[in-house]
Amino acid sequence: MYIIRLSLPVLFIVASLIYAIMIFQLQPAMLGEPNAPRYFPLIICTGILIFSIVDLINMRKENIRQNEDLEMLSRKSTLKVVGIVLGFCLVYTLIFEHLGFLISTILFLGALLFYLNGLKHWILNLSVTIITAFTTWYTFSFLLEISLP
């Protein structure tokens, strides 16, 4: 498990370096700033590279036991939670087109938060659900002018 955990940041570091090489092979823009097509991909590439290096350094600092992650995943309670969350995601994808973004997102977030946090935090669950759904809907629909289903 440690080798798999170690290989992931290394893989992302290599991929981001290859991505950076490909970015510099982009043709300059014909209009406006010649390097404009490179700016956003370079930001993404730099972010992936920095986060991968930080992850690799943090992992090397910690002495992660090889079986710790496997033990956690093998617990029945963890598998149950993962299965139920995946079920919520599946239902969300199935109802999204029929009920639209706002209603399906409220139902999904509400169900997920009530399952994970329990009924005793109902004010927090409802607040987070409604604020997140409406903020996302408002941002896409009015600020970015992207229509949501």
Image: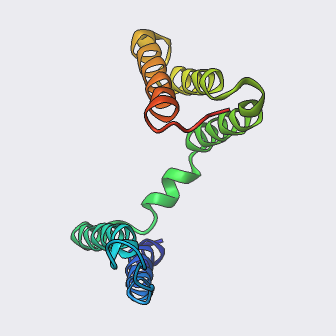
- Nearer the observer, 77 or 50: 50
x and y, in percent, of residue 31 in the image: 40, 74
Question: Residue 30 is drawn in which quadrant?
Answer: bottom left
x and y, in percent, of residue 6 in the image: 40, 76
Quarter the C terminus occupies:
top right
x and y, in percent, of residue 21 in the image: 40, 89
Determine the residue located farthest toward the front in the rendered image.
Answer: 31
Q: Residue at x 59, y 22 (%)?
A: 111
145 sits to left or right of 49: right
53 sits to left or right of 4: left
Q: Residue at x 75, y 30 (%)?
A: 95
When the figure is inspected, residue 60 is found, relative to residue 133, above or below; the finding is below
- Nearer the observer, 78 or 27: 27
- Nearer the observer, 26 or 102: 26
x and y, in percent, of residue 112 in the image: 56, 27
Number of marks in picture: 0
When the figure is inspected, residue 139 is found, relative to residue 58, above or below; the finding is above
When the figure is inspected, residue 91 is found, relative to residue 74, above or below; the finding is above
Q: Residue at x 34, y 79 (%)?
A: 34
- Nearer the observer, 33 or 125: 33
Question: Residue 77 is drawn in which quadrant?
Answer: top right
Which color mode does the image show?
Answer: rainbow
Q: Residue at x 60, y 35 (%)?
A: 147
Question: Residue 23 is drawn in which quadrant?
Answer: bottom left
